[in-house]
Image: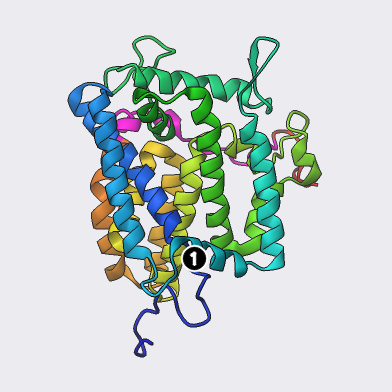
Amino acid sequence: MTEPGEPKGLMDAGERGEALPSALTGSLVFASVAVGVSAFAATLGGGLAPWVSGLALLAGVLVGALAWSATADPAGDAPVGALTGWVRNLTPAEGAALALFAAVSLRQFGWILFERGGLLETLLANNYGDLPLHWTYSRFFASGAPFWPENPIISGERLRYPFGVDLLTALLLSLGAGMRALLPLMGLAGAALSAVALRRWGGALAVAGFLFSGGLAGLEQDAVAWKTLYLALFVPQRGFLLALPAGLLLLWSWRRRLLRGEAGLPPWVEGVLWGALPLVHLHTFLVVSVLYAVWALGGGRLAAAWSTLGWAVVPATWGVWQVSDGFRAVGLLGWAPGWMIGDAHPLLFLL
């Protein structure tokens, strides 16, 4: 029970089983901390040595466990029971959407890399451009490349790319994991986290909308400009494996706290996720940052907004500084009025 005017808790009456599972929060905090600590330690130490990888992963485990504990329901069941309860609370539409999301994810990430006729192939055509790039970055970091790294493809050019997920992959590579195992496993883990976050954010509509965006035309990847988000962005651009669920988790918490006056995640948890986003996906960082400002101003909750900002501002500023080469790489972002309509009639294009 809460007094009038107090923020409601994460597990209000009638909402048990509906609050975002603490496992999602802990997992995303683990990955975010591992990325941030490894990038900072490698920059100080000159490269991604095994001790840097071990330190980053250990820090991620410890802080992730703390976040899990801080967001868990004190009166909740054990993890297996909590998972069972979460599944029981799914509506038929949510269950169907999540089942389809799981089937597509198993197909895409299970065959993200396979051998046929002595050649390494991938199921999705888009991956023939993106996958070698991510493979190169991860191997380059794991080999002990000096930090902040140069572009391994363009000699003498500083790397201006939010490579957080590739860095997380490199941490595991440097400790002996194999790339051919990591690619599908990390893809499936990111897909599971994203499915849970999508369901929490918007129910069955959000899960199915992300999976089936573009309709049947979206499946014709090379024929039309309108794409399915899942195949065109989520699978090939591996930064979304962490950026999508982390961004949705932040928006879910901020929607509760800034717009509804309910309890969200602890400010330090929000700050950890927000502060690491520039290293993972710069566009996601900008989108959630703008929404945070708009919601804080529109909801009249500036006082409540400062606590999270205090946790995030230093790591986020450092991340943007590094990724943008001291705010000089303006080509990282651009505005394209009309998107890809070009010379086509807008109504015909959209139709």
Q: Is residue 55 toward the left or the right of residue 170 in the image?
A: left
Residue at point 44%, 39% (across, down) = 281
Give SS at disc 1: helix
Residue at point 28%, 50% (across, down) = 63
Picture coordinates of residue 14, whole percent (x, y): 53, 81
Residue highlighted by disc 1: 82
Residue at point 64%, 41% (across, down) = 105
Predominant SS of the magenta segment: loop
User: For the magenta stretch, what is the residue range?
Assistant: 321-341
Residue 180 visible in the current orientation: yes
Picture coordinates of residue 222, whole percent (x, y): 74, 28
Residue 213 or 190: which is nearer the viewer?
A: 190
Position above or below: 49 against 77: above
Taking the magenta stretch, the answer to whether it contains residue 339 is yes
How many neighbours does mark 1 have within 10 angstroms: few (below 14), some (14-19), or many (20 or more)? some
The image quadrant that residue 200 belongs to is bottom right
Residue 80 or 155: which is nearer the viewer?
A: 80
Q: Is residue 81 toward the left or the right of residue 350 in the image?
A: left
Picture coordinates of residue 279, whole percent (x, y): 37, 37
